[in-house]
Amino acid sequence: MALKDGSTRYTMFSHAENGKEFHRRIHRIEIQAKHGHLYHLEGDNLPDSIHTNAGVGFKDCHTMEILVPEWQRIPRTPQVARPFFRPTTRDVVYLVMGSVLPIVASGLIALLSAAF
């Protein structure tokens, strides 16, 4: 739950790096998911605090973790539409054009070549 100061809600953001530390009040957090959707956290949906820490870095050792309330979690697998197994008119037309039309075309070519 977010912290409250008068009528405004905020989260306390703290960052420590090499012995120096600073604090900021964050009133709105925007998170962009891999698929491009932008999520907004404001008001009561903000966490109490966010703390980051950085020091002497090592290659590929920096980590950040974002914890979001349960109801706002992004599904790990995308929702897939139910398959549609019944052939449509388009499928039948493509089937006829793909199987019958080449036979008819080859017969016409044979007739035309025999005529000339």
Image (cartoon, helix red, strand yellow):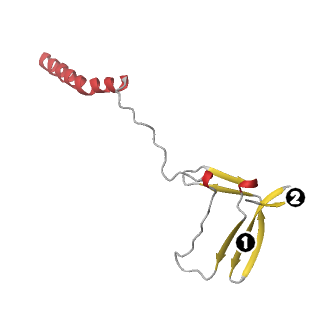
Q: Around disc 1, counting alpha carbons within 10 Å, would you say few (fewer than 14), some (14 to 19), or many (20 or more)?
A: some
Furthest toward the top, the residue is 115
Measuring 17% from the left and 18% from the top, which residue is drawn there? 112
The image quadrant of residue 11 is: bottom right
Measuring 61% from the left and 83% from the top, which residue is drawn there? 56
Pick the residue in front: 52 or 111: 52
Q: Label 1 amino acid? A: Ser
Q: Around disc 2, counting alpha carbons within 10 Å, would you say few (fewer than 14), some (14 to 19), or many (20 or more)?
A: few
Circle 1 sits on which residue? Answer: 14
Measuring 55% from the left and 80% from the top, which residue is drawn there? 58
In this rendering, position of residue 12 left or right of residue 60: right
Q: Is mark 1 on a helix, strand or loop?
A: strand
Q: What element carries label 2?
A: loop
Circle 2 sits on which residue? Answer: 6
Quadrant containing the N terminus in the rendered view: bottom right
Quadrant containing the C terminus in the rendered view: top left
